[in-house]
Amino acid sequence: MKQLTEIDSKKLLSQNDIPIPRNGLARNALEARSLASSMWGLAVFKIMSPDIIHKSDFGAVVLNVDYRNSKVIYDELIAKAAKVNARVDGILVEEMLYGHELIIGLKQDPQFGQIIMVGLGGIYAEIYKDVSFRVSPITVSDAREMLKELRGYKILTGARGKEPADINKITEIIVKVSKLKNIIELDINPLIVNSTSAVVADSRIITES
């Protein structure tokens, strides 16, 4: 069993044609500024540390970073990690994504084998537990049915004037995830989706070896 870092998790997903954000690992403030300025907009900064697993809970993720503030944000994150003596591999700098949030999970079940889960992210996952399950691998038709089973499905189709999500791109990603091999546990949270794209913003993967 092997716990992959977020960087390695995203590399595995990218190798399987699952979109990930443009990103780079900064090992100093100058590199962080250079990477942030290359993102065509605002960036996300994340502490990469084997000692910090739940980055959001720790406050190790900063959204909407302007490259002109990159040194301040970089130094603050490094200082925060130092306070708890966490080892730091660097700061992951990624493009800022916008859209609806989905979660995708993959897990080995002792009775049914590999199970895939899809749900709406944010409060829908935390409060409403709005999720759907299937035994994987699945087809595109299965993936569409999973999405339609969600109580919040209309949100993805543009309810109340909100931007609709590209359902085809979402279903393609769900199917690709369902076909991944040697996975003990996988969490994509969130998958950011809008009318033109669906991209993995954060992921955690445990492989068999």
Image (tube, rainbow, N blue to C red):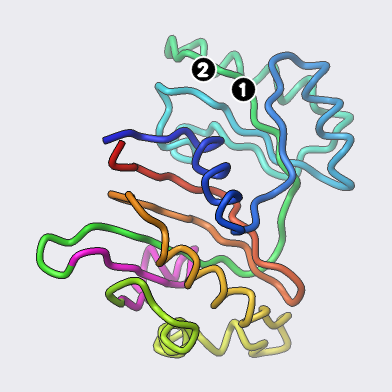
Give residue 176's position: percent from left, percent from top: 50, 66
Q: Residues within 10 Å of mark 1 (few under 14, many from 20)?
A: many
Q: Amino acid at mark 1?
A: Leu
Magenta highlight range = 113-133
For residue 81, which numbered disc appears in the image? 2
- Classify the position of the N terminus by image quarter: top left
Q: Which residue is denoted by mark 1 in the rendering?
A: 77
Q: Is residue 6 above or below residue 179?
A: above
- Of 172 and 49, the residue lying toward us: 172
Q: Residue furthest left?
A: 111
- Of 156 and 114, the residue lying toward us: 114
Q: Amino acid at mark 2?
A: Ala
Residue at 38% from the left image edge and 63% from the top image edge = 126
Residue at 63% from the left image edge and 88% from the top image edge = 157
| Residues marked 1 and 2 touching at CB (< 8 Å) | yes
Residue 168 quadrant: bottom right
Give residue 131's position: percent from left, percent from top: 36, 75
Label 2, secondary structure: give it. helix
For residue 123, which numbered disc appears in the image? none
Q: Does 109 lie within the magenta span? A: no
Label 1, secondary structure: give it. helix
Give residue 93's position: percent from left, percent from top: 71, 34
Residue 207 quadrant: top left
Q: Residues within 10 Å of mark 2 (few under 14, many from 20)?
A: many
41 left or right, relative to 113: right
